[in-house]
Image (cartoon, rainbow, N blue to C red):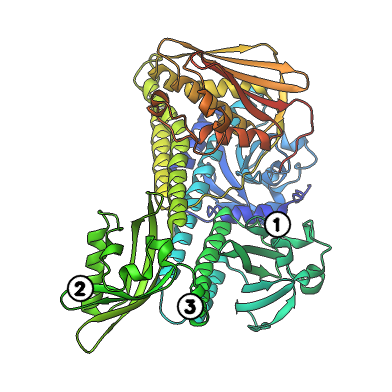
Amino acid sequence: MKTPDLPSNEASRLAALQATHLLDTPPEERFDRVTRLAAKLFDVPICLVSLIDSDRQWFKSCLGLDVRETGRDISFCGHAILGSNLFVVEDALTDERFSDNPLVTGPPDIRFYAGAPLTDLEGYRLGTLCLIDRSPRTFSEQDQLALRDFADIIEREFRYQELNSYYTDRTRALNILNDIALDTSGKIDHRIERALAIACQYLNIDTAIVSKIEGEAYTILWHHERQTPSLQNGLTLPLAQTYCAILMNQPDVLAIDHMATSPYLDLPCYQMFGLESYLAAPIWVNGNAVGTLNFSSTEPRLPGFTETEKTFVSLLARWIADLIQQQDQAATLDKLVSNAPGMLYQYRLWPDNHSSFPYTSEGIQNIFSLTADDVFEDAAAAFERIHPDDLPLVTESIKQSAENLEPWEAQYRVLSPEGHWRWIEGKANPEKLPEGSVLWHGYLVDIDERRKNEEMKNQFVSTVSHELRTPLTSIAGSLGLILGGVTGDISEKTRQMLNITRRNADQLRALIDDLLDIEKLVSGNMLMVMEQHPIADVVSTSIEHLQSYANQKDVQLHLKETSAGLEANIDPQRLQQAVANLLSNAVKFSPPRENVTIKVRQMGDQAIIEVTDKGTGVPESFRDRIFEKFAQADASSARAKEGTGLGLAITKQLMQAMGGDAGYESEEGAGATFWLSMPIQGPADNE
């Protein structure tokens, strides 16, 4: 008997298996349904969904067996996960690897075995969907294709499981960040160290540090250690000897899952500290990277830091940056009042509701476009510059602060010298004077850019919602047409499966909606899985997905493949997304009863996809901005079309990430041809 070998990525594979949260869970109908159907189709007594753990194979779905697990060392599935293809043993008694296997010589008396590997989104083979018979039999190519189809259904359920885990973890991370931000008790030092302890627990990591970087000096401001303390606040080291020296050369979050296998293996920081995993984000204050928030451990991170964890650290760094900024502002107010940013002031309200600014800094000119003399005796000139919609809220908040002697805070719009409205933020502490008036000591700052950034982020989330909902809507619409009888009569079993698929699509859409409701920022990292792949297959799939939308717009889609069998080194999923963006735009801007033509051709060493419509074309004034994020034409006919102006920007970025490009040719009023190019030659390179 041959004991199955271990995959080369066994540690990461086991970590990925644990991350599914499927092991040792009760049976589920979504898996049992598949094993029942497969067993009936192939006429076998045993069908299993087997997950390969460190020393056992555990059955998530178990049809025809009375046990839920067996040893990995005697498993057939342990062999099956070593390759990507189906693993078939037509007669175990004649196979020297299994002829004396106790599962062959004794119950369940295996003679025939066929197993299809089950893979997660990261490519780890977690287990198999396998068929077992007590008699030898052959297994044709058609049989293998059918078993692979069933395995794909199981893998789809794995995807749903992963999505559910992703959304659950994302919600948990955001809730933790929300709790940290809302807990304002104690001084800044205590708040940050409390947040670091919470973050270490969430990330399940040993050490957290907030550092300050000045020149080539690295100083620990705050830290938390879950193990025996070895650090102290105020410790200063040469920046070059720390992992943060790597981070300062990165635009955003730096994640090192296993330092020993990373490009940074030979750096002095690894030789000195021996940290194997590291996750960090820069701390930006007033546009400058003033320090870092970093988490580290002497153990590797398997299967690796998740995008949610990276986003968590990035957002926590921003929160810490806000606290540091508040602390710095307080110090600046104490030392350099006359040079403080924004407007420092004293505002006085008398019992008869007359008000004035006994003191204002020079920043009043930037905030209200006034001088200190303009408001020294009467504050009316400043209030006249407040937006009419915001004025009642500002006056009411001042009234409440005066009555309760609680700090005053507000955000509102004021009129700029250029005639547009700018957002400002104000904070002040009141004190009651003997004669009954109230005097506030505070400041006002311009937050217009920050508000614009927040609006841009909200618009981005809305755009993502559109991009994600479009394929789901198409899927749901197609399923509805089939179930409605458009394609003819279907069997009851097919109807049941289609109903299940439609319900799952609806659930996935609901999950996406929930995520978009709470998510404020989306990571810019994108995994590209490159492979030699037929171009026409991707284009055909994209057309199928957009066909329902085209039908709704009464537009015909026509594919003209002029270079048959053309392949390129691409990520099929990302290319499909890019093609779908072009098709969606072409359909959207095409008049009813017109054609959209899609061509696939070769030009030199490039594969070219062209999408041609007969719409109004690209306006001349818009052409230099067409691939910019959130760009839309200003023409009324274009603005009337649905969309947020992100699709073409995404398309160009996707193509450039695959080593290609995107462009267009257009005459205003005569339609447009948008094209995608990608290199034909080149080895597959996953990055």
Q: CA distance from mark 2 to mark 3?
A: 27 Å
Q: Residue 564 is drawn in which quadrant? A: top right
Q: Residue at x 67, y 71 (%)?
A: 213
Q: Amino acid at mark 1?
A: Ala
* Percent position of residue 430, x then y: 30, 80
C-alpha gap between disc 2 and disc 1: 73 Å
Sort mark 1 into few (<14), some (14-19) or many (20+) by Cα contacts within 10 Å.
some
Image coordinates for residue 502, horizontal then vertical, percent: 40, 32
What is the residue that sits farthest to the front in this orientation? 373
Q: Residue at x 33, y 59 (%)?
A: 412
Q: How busy is the neighbourhood of tag 2: few (under 14 within 10 Å), some, or many (20 plus)? A: few
**Point 21% across, 71% down: residue:** 399
| Quarter of the figure that contains the C terminus | top right
Q: Amino acid at mark 2?
A: His
Which residue is tagged 1?
Answer: 11
Residue 354 numbered mark, or none? 2
Secondary structure of residue under mark 1: helix
Image disc number at residue 337? 3
Q: Is residue 28 visible?
A: no
Q: Point out the tag, 2 or 3, that comes first from the N-terminus.
A: 3
Q: CA distance from mark 1 to mark 3?
A: 58 Å
> Pointers 1 and 3 in contact (CB under 8 A)?
no
Give percent across and percent down for residue 469.
Answer: 43, 36
Secondary-structure class at tag 2 = loop
